[in-house]
Amino acid sequence: MQGVGFRPFIYDLAGRLGISGTVSNTTEGVFIKTGSLSYVELLDFIKNIREKSPDPSVIENISFKETGHRKYSGFIIENSTETENRFQLISPDIATCEKCIEDVFNSDDSRRYLYPFTNCTNCGPRFTIIKKMPYDRPYTTMDKFKMCSGCMTEYRDPSDRRFHAQPNACKKCGPELLLTDKTGNTVCSRDPIKRAAELLGEGGIIGIKSLGGFQIACDAASEKTVKKLRERKSRPAKPFAIMIGNIEWIRKHYRLSPEEASSLKSARAPIVLLRKNSSTYPLSCSVSFENKYEGIMLPYTPIHHILFKYMPGPLVMTSGNISEEPIASGNNDAKKRLKNICDYYLMHNREIYSRYDDSVIRIFMDKEMVLRRARGYAPYPIKINGHAGSRSVLATGAHEKNTFTILTRKYAISSQHIGDLDTYQSLEFFEDTLINYKSLFGLDEFDIVAHDMHPDYRSTKIARSSISSNMLFPVQHHMAHISSVIAENNLECPLLGFAWDGTGYGTDGKIWGSEIFEVSSNLDFIRIGHLIEKALPGSAATIKKPYRMAAVYLRQLWKRNNSNESLRDYIYNNMAY
Ligand SMILES: [Zn+2]
Ligand SMILES: [Zn+2]
């Protein structure tokens, strides 16, 4: 995978172990050629690669062979041998690394002290700024910034942490921040983050342009401000996520396991659902009301780190969107769509090419369970170890909480979270993202397009309009869930699959729910259990209003008991409240 600092890591490691040779990155993986090594030296080298490789890189396997003796003088990083339109993996965006945080708070560093776009080969924007492959500065949204001589020296020096860091920038040459009011008039350009922190402290609501789009921030401890945000965002009840710069604060107010702490601090830096410590909970009750869990994240860009230098308290940090629409990413887009929500904008002039929400995870049985897969995760693929076939497949996903997935060369590449396909904006987001993925992964057409069986899902309509009908492959909703669990976790069949996520269109044209399948070793599905069929009062409206379903069950109970009372009296007299 490109852009994760793997070659500089190998260069550095080889130097420390006194190994000579070369390292190159190809579409097949990373190749390291070395001079003569003893078996012990070789094993030590491999052990170090496994244990010390940079956090965002993923090692699927390491193999080695002897190719005859050759002498190398020193260790050389060879240029990548990718060609355009060839398949290669792309790195997700990576949270600011420890060393870059040190640079940002080092007052002796005249080029990077409090510079909010500091990054290196181990961290910073990736997927969100890539316009096309190969991953090279002219093909990113950093192309309009010309590196100064200091940045260029770092970029060309294999021993430097910023060697080939495509978004490399400093105060002299890189992007800039600006604080504006809601109409776009400049409020502060000299110290915009400091001023933004003051305004947040005074109850302001600020749109902050982050890695993958705008976030909306406000003081999480102020009941008045959080209520104001809820009113402006027309979001009466859904919990908000919190960002805080201090993990000790999190430890004090939430139950934090070692696994949860490690996810929070990881290079992916997701929102982690944590259980509140009710006796010490210090925030506005409007942040998440009676929910036992709250979504918490740590700062993941220098903008956030600097903000928390001036603003020690926690902030509500929610997606810059209206309701279920996609997140706003352009400066003008934000000013237009968020104008009734934000008092100010903290904006910059580095363009976001791919929109990307914050990811949400929870720890389940000591492992990450991803609830919303976007920043830090997509477009990293799932490797299919079983039989994946040779044909390329596009799966257009479901209607709500949509993502699509591309299957190619044993990799299942899921898009970032796109959202509910109810609005024009989300359909546009789906289409733009699909065009982008096809271009980045070098795919022109798909051999097969798989879609949900539901005829009214927008994702079904997109599938039907994209390919001739004999290449369409309808999949039953719950079977799709079970299949994806099998693929993602490399499960052996036969097995029993339970899909209790809600309703889905069945193979018999009825709406199914709470399905249990027996899955054979050939991946044949037999439906062996489900909820008893019931009327859905108001059809699809029941999905969003589950009390309607409760009414159906109460009525059934009343009928079964042949009660002489009216339904209303029966419920009133017999139900425990
Ligand atoms: Zn860094
Ligand atoms: Zn520079």
Image (tube, grey):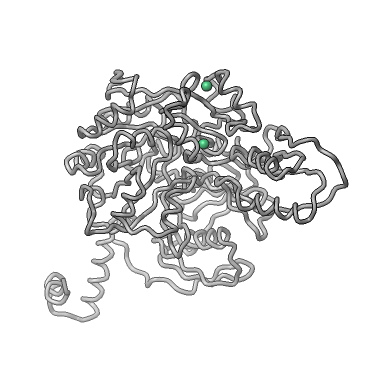
Q: Position of residue 158 (x, y in %)?
A: 66, 32
- Please give left or right for residue 113 compared with residue 413 in the image: left
The quarter of the displayed image where residue 212 is located: top left
Q: Is residue 557 visible?
A: yes
Pick out the residue farthest to the right: 68
- Please give left or right for residue 285 compared with residue 411 in the image: left
Q: Position of residue 310 (x, y in %)?
A: 30, 33
- Please give left or right for residue 31 compared with residue 504 in the image: right
Vertical side of 576 occupied by 173: above or below: above
The quarter of the displayed image where residue 203 is located: top left
Q: Is residue 470 visible?
A: no
- Observer-nearest of 573 and 212: 212
Quarter the C terminus occupies: bottom left
Vertical side of 517 occupied by 456: above or below: above
The quarter of the displayed image where residue 458 is located: top left
Residue at 47% x, 57% y is 368
Quarter the N terminus occupies: top right
Q: How many marks?
A: 0
Vertical side of 225 occupied by 451: above or below: below
Vertical side of 102 occupied by 242: above or below: below
Residue at 56% x, 23% y is 151
Residue at 74% x, 43% y is 19
Q: Position of residue 283 (x, y in %)?
A: 23, 48
Residue at 64% x, 37% y is 8
Q: Position of residue 466 (x, y in %)?
A: 56, 41
- Please give left or right for residue 195 compared with residue 530 in the image: left
